[in-house]
Image (spheres, grey):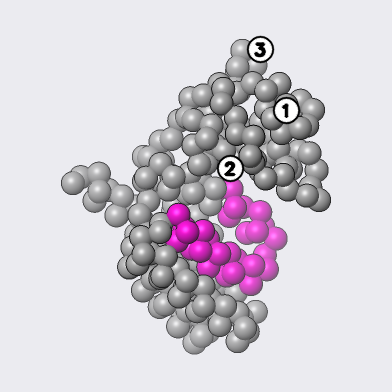
Amino acid sequence: MPIPTDHSKPVRKTAKESAFNQLQQWIIDGTLRPGEKLNDKELAEALGVSRTPIRESLQLLEAQGFVKMYPGKSTQVTEVEEESMADLLPPLAALQALAAELAIPHLTDQVILLLEHTNERFAQAVRSKNYFVALKIDEEFHQIIVDTANNPYLLKMIPSLQSHVRRLFFHNSIVLTEESIEEHTALIEYLKERDAAKASESMRRNWLRIIKEFHSLVCE
């Protein structure tokens, strides 16, 4: 099992948090491939921790659907099921739409300016076809709204779904387009107007459109 040795080691985190974050990232970006069997001893040595935080991390990853544990046998990275997008995106869209609605009372001029600046960076990345950077900036854009909504449950639930979206991106199932830029711009305008209903619906459309684009690519 090839394991990178040049990974970053986050500070001020527990061993379990660090292990979980690194293992999740390796699964998302394909370093740990779909179907690959995971050896907790090798992972512990690679990350410089004991086997306990590795096992705890694998349990969390199984709960999130990234690995499958077969007691007494093996632990494997789950397969990437592109069809799962139709199950994944509607609940994420609903939560993101709610975040846009809940953010309205907490919006400030600084938040609006930050959203506009972030969308400009996003546009530059999309137009230069740097889609990996565009994805990261897109996440920043939406996270600003989620953070502004300041709802502890959304803050816990959205990242789990978002991580699966990121994994689908790495496996070439999601494409970021000019339309995404325009949708962000429209969303910002609705937020400026403090129109919760339109902001919520705009956010929902932004996420659900990905399903239509994916099916279009599959049918080509």
Q: Which residue is mark 3?
A: 72
Label 2, secondary structure: give it: helix
Q: Indicate the quadrant where residue 16 lies.
A: top right
151 with respect to 100 (left or right): right
Viewer-proximal residue among 9 and 38: 9
The amino acid type, in three-letter code, at marker 3 is Gly
25 with respect to 42 (left or right): left
In the rendered image, the vertical position of residue 84 relative to residue 72, given as above or below? below
- Circle 3 residues within 10 Å: few <14, some 14–19, many ≥20: few
Which disc number belongs to residue 25? 2
In the rendered image, the vertical position of residue 176 relative to residue 144, given as above or below? above
Give the x, y percent position of residue 190: 46, 81
Position of the N terminus, as image quadrant, is top right
**Labels in figure, total:** 3
In terms of sequence position, does the residue under pointer 2 or pointer 3 come before the other?
2
Viewer-proximal residue among 41 and 220: 41
Nearer the observer, disc 3 or disc 1? Answer: 1
Which disc number belongs to residue 18? none
Instruction: Residue at 40% x, 36% y: name it.
Output: 81
